[in-house]
Image: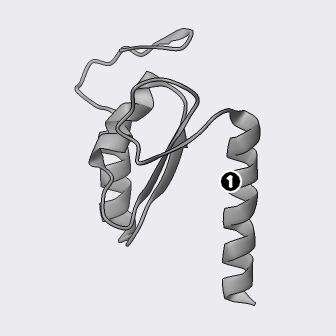
């Protein structure tokens, strides 16, 4: 699979989406947050639903439900999420 300045090669059919789905099952996660900027992240965006949060960083067609414009906005989003988690624990 081709991406931004990378080519992923595998001998078995595996994707980031398969990996995230397996991690969810192994950990018993009730929700997943995933943010990515590459076409290879689309396999994850397609397996997320319900309470999950999928965020595309940058332009382009995407299956993600949300989008930020650039890495600076991605960083701000992570700060907001960290603040929310910290407040919930306090």
Foreground: 56 or 8? 56
Residue 30: x, y in percent? 37, 72
What residue is rendered at 69% in x and 55% in y?
78
State the quadrant of the C terminus.
bottom right
Residue 73 coordinates in the image, percent (x, y) = 71, 42
The number of callouts visible is 1
Q: Is residue 15 left or right of residue 56?
A: left
Residue at image point 41% right, 67% down: 31
Q: Which residue is mark 1?
A: 77
User: Residue 29 appears in which quarter of the rendering?
Assistant: bottom left
Left or right: where does residue 57 sit relative to residue 33?
Answer: right
Q: Nearer the viewer, residue 36 or 15?
A: 36
| Residue at image coords 31%, 53% | 22
As displayed, is residue 60 above or below residue 88?
Answer: above
In this figure, which colouring scheme has been used for the structure? one colour
Measured as percent of width and height from the top left, residue 3 is found at 47, 15
Quadrant holding the N terminus: top left
Q: Does residue 73 sit above or below 76 in this rendering?
A: above
Of all residues, the one furthest to the left in this rendering is 13
State the SS at label 1.
helix
Check the image and name the residue furthest to the bottom.
90
| Residue 74 in which image quadrant | top right
The 10 Å Cα crowd at callout 1, few under 14, some 14 to 19, many 20 or more, is some
Who's the residue at 30% across and 57% down the image?
49
């Amino acid at each position: 699979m081709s991406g931004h300045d990378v080519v992923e090669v595998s001998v078995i059919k595996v994707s980031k989406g398969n990996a995230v789905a397996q991690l969810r099952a192994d950990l018993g996660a009730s929700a997943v947050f995933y943010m990515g900027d590459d076409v290879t992240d689309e396999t994850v965006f397609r397996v997320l639903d319900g309470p999950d949060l999928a965020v595309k960083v940058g332009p382009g067609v995407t299956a993600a439900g949300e989008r930020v414009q650039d890495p600076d906005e991605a960083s701000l989003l992570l700060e907001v999420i960290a603040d929310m988690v910290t407040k919930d624990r306090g």
